[in-house]
Image (tube, rainbow, N blue to C red):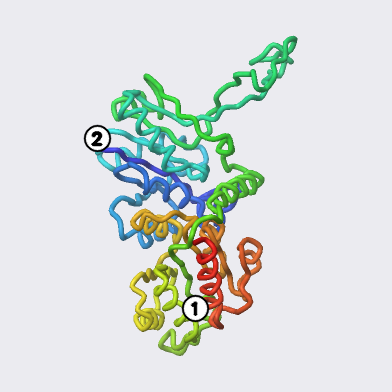
């Protein structure tokens, strides 16, 4: 069965300006669910949007895979009053109804995971439901506006641990068969399956306060990888501000000069001698950096990557590494999601404050001034202690 998903995004957002591409923990909001969808059992994932910046981002960033595509959404389906079902119908027509199962993923639920997506898929594909949705268990006592208790008897107030509570839609993931959707025109119908998600996924990002709450929840979840009881198997490095001091010289022809530390280079050689892999991942495309990586014999060099988190997930899956088994050195906000989710995180002394506030270790040296060598020394000693 062909399993496809759409992530509908509008350019306009009144409560939070440019919400879908605003950075949450250093990544555009929509990439959190997109990355999880990419690593799920879906066959195809479509970003359906009228936002030209997002269209450009997706087309450039994910050109390495055919699984992620972007489609232009019409002005009519992008208004404040247009329903999600209206957008879904437009999307289905745009792909000529070429699907068996359709899944709706919401960017405003960045705590969604590939595991939750796969459970919704299984509800329909394996358990033969016509549609399915994600919910959260809630044990709040509910009243109506007339002062009537709805879901419990206030004369016999139950203990929370004895109270069954109720299930609430969290607005994260919906799935439907082609037959159900094209017959009813709505996202769920027929025999409906339920998939429970953790309590922290209840909040959708609609208002500014929601943003800060969800961002904190997401950070707490990522930090669970920091178990500090595994040997480091790989080191990931940013370039500008890490290999270099964060400056570049230009002339009329473009980039002219970057400065690198020879001692940092020797540090990376020491890592390889200790069977620790080195990966360099950067959002820039630089001939100077490429030449330096060749000189250092670093084969694991990934230039022009903006969504570093998703790319690193690809690498970890391929190498069978866990995040707790890797270290990361970064200096700026686009490194944040990786820095807070790996086993050990480092930043140079001249990193930006937002990064210094989040990493495990602020190095004594600046980027391009033996910061990498310092991190290497820590990793070697740490691994010795874990032997």
**Circle on res. 1:** 2
Return the disc, 2 or 1, that comes first in the chain's sequence: 2
Q: Disc 2 and disc 1: Cα gap in Å?
A: 47 Å
**On the rendered structure, is 72 left or right of 344?**
left
**On the rendered structure, is 166 left or right of 38?**
right
- Residue 91 image position (x, y, % from top left): 34, 41
Disc number lying in front (2 or 1): 1
| Above-or-below relation of 321 to 243 | above
- Residue 200 image position (x, y, % from top left): 58, 38
Q: Nearer the viewer, residue 314 or 16?
A: 314
| Above-or-below relation of 351 to 1 | below
In the picture, the quarter occupied by the N terminus is top left
- Residue 236 image position (x, y, % from top left): 46, 67
Residue at position x 36%, y 75% in the image: 298
Residue at position x 64%, y 64% in the image: 354
**On the rendered structure, is 198 left or right of 280?**
right
Q: Does dot 2 land on a helix, a strand or a loop?
A: loop
Asked if residue 22 shows in the view, the reply is no
- Residue 16 image position (x, y, % from top left): 60, 49
Q: Does dot 1 land on a helix, a strand or a loop?
A: loop
Residue at position x 52%, y 68% in the image: 379
Q: Quadrant of residue 234?
A: bottom left
| Above-or-below relation of 245 to 5 | below
Assess whether mark 1 and mark 2 are in contact (beta carbons under 8 angstroms): no
Write down the residue under mark 1.
243
User: Is disc 2 surrounded by few (<14), some (14 to 19) or many (20+) residues within 10 Å?
Assistant: few
Q: Quadrant of residue 246?
A: bottom right
Q: Nearer the viewer, residue 378 or 62?
A: 378
């Amino acid at each position: 069965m062909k399993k496809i998903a759409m992530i509908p995004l509008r350019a306009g957002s009144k409560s939070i300006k440019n919400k879908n591409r605003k950075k949450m923990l250093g990544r555009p909001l929509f990439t959190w669910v997109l990355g999880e969808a990419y690593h799920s059992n879906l066959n195809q994932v479509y970003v359906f949007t009228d936002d030209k910046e997002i269209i450009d981002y997706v087309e450039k960033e994910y050109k390495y895979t055919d699984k992620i595509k972007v489609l232009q959404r019409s002005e009519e389906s992008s208004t404040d009053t247009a329903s999600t079902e209206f957008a879904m119908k437009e999307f289905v027509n745009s792909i000529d109804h070429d699907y068996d199962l359709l899944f709706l993923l919401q960017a405003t639920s960045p705590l969604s995971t590939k595991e939750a997506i796969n459970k919704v898929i299984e509800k329909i594909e394996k358990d033969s439901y016509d549609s399915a949705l994600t919910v959260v268990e809630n044990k709040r006592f509910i009243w109506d506006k007339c002062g009537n208790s709805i879901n419990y008897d206030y004369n016999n107030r139950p203990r929370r641990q004895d109270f069954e509570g109720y299930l609430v839609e969290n607005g994260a993931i919906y799935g439907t068969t082609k037959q159900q959707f094209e017959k009813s025109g709505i996202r769920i119908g027929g025999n409906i399956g339920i998939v429970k998600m953790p309590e922290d996924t209840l909040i959708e990002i609609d208002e500014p306060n929601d943003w800060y709450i969800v961002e904190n929840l997401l950070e707490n979840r990522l930090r669970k990888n920091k178990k500090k009881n595994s040997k480091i198997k790989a080191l990931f490095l940013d370039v500008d501000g890490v290999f270099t001091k964060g400056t570049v010289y230009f002339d009329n022809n473009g980039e002219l000069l970057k400065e690198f530390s020879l001692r940092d280079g020797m540090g990376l050689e020491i890592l390889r001698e200790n069977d620790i892999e080195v990966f360099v991942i950067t959002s820039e495309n630089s001939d100077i950096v490429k030449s330096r990586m060749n000189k250092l014999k670093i084969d694991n060099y990934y230039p022009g990557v903006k969504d570093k988190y998703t790319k690193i997930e690809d690498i970890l899956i391929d190498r069978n590494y866990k995040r707790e088994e890797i270290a990361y050195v970064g200096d700026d906000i686009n490194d944040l999601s990786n820095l807070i989710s790996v086993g050990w995180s480092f930043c140079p002394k001249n990193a930006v404050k937002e990064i210094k506030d989040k990493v495990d270790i602020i190095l004594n040296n600046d980027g391009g001034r033996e910061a990498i060598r310092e991190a290497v020394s820590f990793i070697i000693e740490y691994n010795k202690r874990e032997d």
